Amino acid sequence: MHRQYKQEGTNVVTADMDNILNRHSGAGRDHLIPILQDVQETEGYISPRAVAKIAEFLNLPASKIYGVATFYNQFRFHPKGRYHFMVCRGTACHVKGSKKVLDELTKQLKLEPGQTSRDQMFSLEVVACMGACGLAPVVSVNGEFYAKVTPRKLTEIIQECRQKEAVNV
Amino acid sequence: MITLDVDGRTVEAQAGETILTVLRREGIHVPTLCHMDGLPPSGACRMCVVEVEGSPSLTPSCSFPVAQGMKVKTSTPRVLEARRTIVKLLLASHPDDCLYCNSNGHCDLQKLAQDLGVRERVYRGPRRVQEMDMSSPAIVRDPAKCILCGRCVRMCEEIQGVAAIDFIGRGSRAKIGTAFDGGLNVSTCVNCGQCVNVCPTGALSERCYIDDVITALNDPTKRVVVQHAPSVSVSLAEEFGSPAGKDVDGQMVTALRRLGFHRVFDTAFSADLTIMEEGSELVHRIKTGGKLPMFTSCSPGWIKFIETFYPQLLPNVSSCKSPQQMLGALIKTFFAEREGVDPANIVSVSIMPCTAKKFECARPEMSRNHVPDVDYVLTTRELGRMLHQFGVNLAALEPSAADTPFGERSSAGKIFGTSGGVMEAAIRSAHFLITGRELEDLKIQPLRGLKGCKELHVEVDGIKLGAAVVSGLGNARKILDEVVAGRDDLQFIEIMTCPGGCINGGGQPKNIDPAAIEARMKALYKIDRDAPLRTSHSNPWIQRIYKEYLGQPLGEKSHALLHTHYTMRNIPITNG
């Protein structure tokens, strides 16, 4: 089984965090967002442990950091799944029925946007536009684009993921 | 001095004042939701809008400075309609369960809707299902009733320096919560309840134990005793519509008997006891080169604060339990033995101005053989509610005195209820302990008043004493940082969690008017001025309990019953 992101609690994460914070040494609270972005890029998500480290580093309350991070759509608080679904909810996709696609995906994966399944297989994210409006509605899985997605097509995509997973194990 | 025109009248103002400040001084009530006296304006709620001539849009009066010749109109149809619309929008997704709400009758939102004549639901917003946070033993959060004014957040961060809560998310999904939206019990919350006092709605309230107390009162196998804190008698009357600052000590004791409590004790008695123990501890520390400055330990919010944020200073905290817990310990030992009752069959209730006391009585070190020393804590507000439930009309009652052996107090114990009171009481007794003489003037003016930080430097028989009195945890942070940085001219520091002390505690009648807090303070000092017994060490019942039971201050028995230890808290920031 391949894990895309390092798990919390290992020394590797601590070392990564230290590297990130070293890059921002001497920074003030105005560096909070760049630091959060670096953490997300390295670890894939913002963990409670990372927030605690940043809180100590910037001398900010953890509640404040979580508050700022949740203000922006770009930050996630659970590790990404091995199959990361991004559903476009931009204008063109909306007109072409992306609401139905999202509802169907929520139902089939049993996940709300921002969540990751317990077995770490699937995660779901809503984005505003992927710049592929001609292909609306668009869904991407681990960077691979699916055009003109219908609820029925979604079932196939998910099935495809499960088959890949079976091969990988 | 500048002049401006308000609704056709000429009004004087200082440059730099906000329009709101001037309007309030002129007796014009401008409604606000997010505004907090003493903090910079946030201008978020827009309830305070007025018309300023020459400005195309409405102006938020809380954050706009006055100018020479400015023409302000405060209640034009446009202004009123704007305010009304805000209330309608706030109500659009509100649960509308006023009849069942804890804040019914003293809710700012309800009052605004009433005052502005909002009589129908115009907008219907989606109701999000939001879980209540019942995780804390002291405070309950009901996010469904929250209108996101942000007062609790600012209180917690800017005044108390705790910052346990903040805004989470954005737009229609925004809410107030802790880091990673965990429960208050796993956050840095110190249970002070100041957020409850400033909450305009029923979104924040104390965890209510009235039903538990009623059950205990109706259990024939239980002896139910109650103690009441020094500051409760000067604020309880407000729950019955009296103006702030009325002392109802005697009536309250009668009322507690009417509720069915078997014995009524005065926590000010154990405040006297605290002075004996804490005063002796201070003298001991000074004479033996112990850790100084010594911090007081009466205020449980402050204790959790230092355990969380400044654990390196824990050796500086007095090992004395708070007066509530000292009396609790005596009730379940000395009193139980004297009465021949099994401590497990005594239910010990306390009436406190405080929500953190609910947390304190549940601390594991505050029980013996799994029997807590204090079983339930009710706030002043809860006592008011309980008296209303039982149909007790406070004003009509004949005053009576509290019960022996913990009913007699000195007024030094009584002034514990205001910031500076513990220090004043301690200095009165320390002077006697050191010199053998009473202070000539028992009133120590520099320690009085509602200022956040007060200091006094005195010399008594060659012993220099630097004392500081701090209230509000934000102010505590400042002095703690000084101590950490090496400041060494202070020997004794009184720290109270709530700004102004217990008279402004998180369990007091909701009244954020500074004049009300001052009136409560004055009432306590008036009691002290007129009291025959004004020093803790001269309280005959204190002398008696040492002679008959405790031995001497800091003695073996005192140590076992009246002293405690503290825990470094490594607060997990999430419940995950």
Image (cartoon, grey):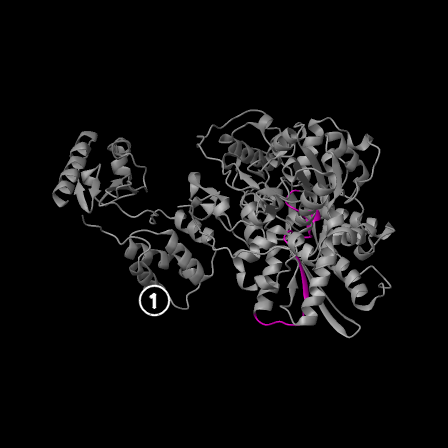
Residue farthest to the left?
A: A167
Q: What residue span does the magenta drawing correspond to?
A: B485-507
Image side of residue B432 versus residue B320, left or right: right
Q: Position of residue B444 (x, y in %)?
A: 80, 61
**Which sits in the foreground, B529 or A106?**
B529
Residue at horizontal 25 percent and vertical 32 percent from the top: A108
Residue at horizontal 64 percent and vertical 72 percent from the top: B488
- Judge whether residue B503 is colored magenta: yes
Mark 1 secondary-structure assignment: helix
Q: Which residue is mark 1?
A: A23
- Whether residue B67 is visible to the viewer of this picture, yes or no, is no
Q: Position of residue B170 (x, y in %)?
A: 42, 44
Residue at horizontal 65 percent and vertical 28 percent from the top: B219
| Res. A87 image quadrant | top left
Image side of residue A56 versus residue B347, left or right: left
Q: Position of residue B165 (x, y in %)?
A: 50, 48
B481 lies above or below A126: below
**Which sits in the foreground, B553 or A166?**
B553
Q: Amino acid at mark 1?
A: Arg
**Which sits in the foreground, B444 or B204?**
B444
Magenta stretch prevailing secondary structure: loop
How many marks the image carries: the answer is 1
- Whether residue B472 is visible to the viewer of this picture, yes or no, is yes
